């Protein structure tokens, strides 16, 4: 039975009360989810710590910490045209391990940071989008200057054993300017570490 059929069977006073509650319900649920649920602040804090863990793992080339951030059945679509889709946590960890091994062989160091520009809250998942910046520092005795590159990311988080983990990830290339120009949003993670190699001329 539709709403019009229901309201037709209610007297005028009841109908006014009923419509008032319908209007209130629509008003409440048309607001952004972050304005309704106090639990979102706790979720934001948990997800923010996730980015900090990723930063720590890169700084220390810690593949175990990287692997702990992903769901066992996670999928990752990298930006390189020559790379296929990684279909498990193990495959993703191996991908990162190859990168870390290259850094170690070159006696270099690497840092990463993120700026979240969009967050979508769903019933069973949270999706983040934004920019990342990576700084690659060669060994000092090479005389080579540090370099940086940036990209766009999408992370879909799900709760697994009361821990937020990445279930799906996609990245694509971006200019460092887009990372630097991204503005803080609400309580979402916003990298403020100084990874600057040089300040882009366009800023």
Image (spheres, rainbow, N blue to C red):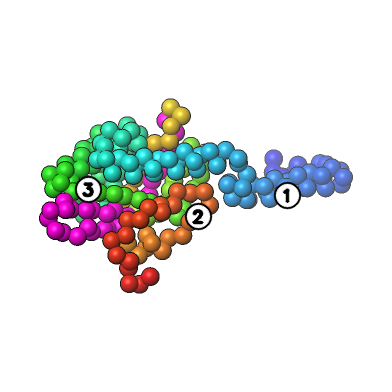
Q: Which residue is mark 2?
A: 185
Question: Which residue is pictured at 25% across the width and 49% down the height?
Answer: 110
- The local crowd at label 1, few if under 14, some if 14 to 19, many if 20 or more residues have their Cα within 10 Å, is few
Q: Secondary structure at mark 1?
A: helix
Q: Which residue is mark 1?
A: 23
Q: Is residue 156 above or below residue 197?
A: above
Q: Nearer the viewer, residue 81 or 60?
A: 60
Question: Which residue is pictured at 53% across the width and 38% down the height?
Answer: 42
| Corner quadrant of residue 176 | bottom left
Q: Quadrant of the C terminus?
A: bottom left
Q: Which residue is mark 3?
A: 109
Question: Which residue is pictured at 31% across the width and 35% down the height?
Answer: 65
Asked if residue 134 can be seen in this view, the reply is yes
Measured Cα–Cα span from mark 2 to mark 3: 29 Å
Where in the figure is residue 105, as x and y percent of width and height?
Answer: 12, 44
Magenta highlight: main SS = strand
Q: Secondary structure at mark 3?
A: strand
Q: Is residue 25 left or right of residue 34?
A: right
Measured Cα–Cα span from mark 2 to mark 1: 30 Å
Question: Which residue is pictured at 18% across the width and 46% down the height?
Answer: 103
Where in the figure is residue 156, as x and y percent of width and height?
Answer: 40, 43
Q: Nearer the viewer, residue 75 or 137?
A: 137
Q: Is residue 176 above or below residue 161?
A: below
Q: Earlier in the sequence, mark 2 or mark 1?
A: 1
Q: Earlier in the sequence, mark 2 or mark 3?
A: 3
| Corner quadrant of residue 150 | bottom left
Give the magenta-colored segment's residue range.
Answer: 133-160
Question: Is the residue under label 3 in contact with that under label 2 (CB below 8 Å)?
Answer: no
- The local crowd at label 3, few if under 14, some if 14 to 19, many if 20 or more residues have their Cα within 10 Å, is some
| Corner quadrant of residue 57 | top left
């Amino acid at each position: 039975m539709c709403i019009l059929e229901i309201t037709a069977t209610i007297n005028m006073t009841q109908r006014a009360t009923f419509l008032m509650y319908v209007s209130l319900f629509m008003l409440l649920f048309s607001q952004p989810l972050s304005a309704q649920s106090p639990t979102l602040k706790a979720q934001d804090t948990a997800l923010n710590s996730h980015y900090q863990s990723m930063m720590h793992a890169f700084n220390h080339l810690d593949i175990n910490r990287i692997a702990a951030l992903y769901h066992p059945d996670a999928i990752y679509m990298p930006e390189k045209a020559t790379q296929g889709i990684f279909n498990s946590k193990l495959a993703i960890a191996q991908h990162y391990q190859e990168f870390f091994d290259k850094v170690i062989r070159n006696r270099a160091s690497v840092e990463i940071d993120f700026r979240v520009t969009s967050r979508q809250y769903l019933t069973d998942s949270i999706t983040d989008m934004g920019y990342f910046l990576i700084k690659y520092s060669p060994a000092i005795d090479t005389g080579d200057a540090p370099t940086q590159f940036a990209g766009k990311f999408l992370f879909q988080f799900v709760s697994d054993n009361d821990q937020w983990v990445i279930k799906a990830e996609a990245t694509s290339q971006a200019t460092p300017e887009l990372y630097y120009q991204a503005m803080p949003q609400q309580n979402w993670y916003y990298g403020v570490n100084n990874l600057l190699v040089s300040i882009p001329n366009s800023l």
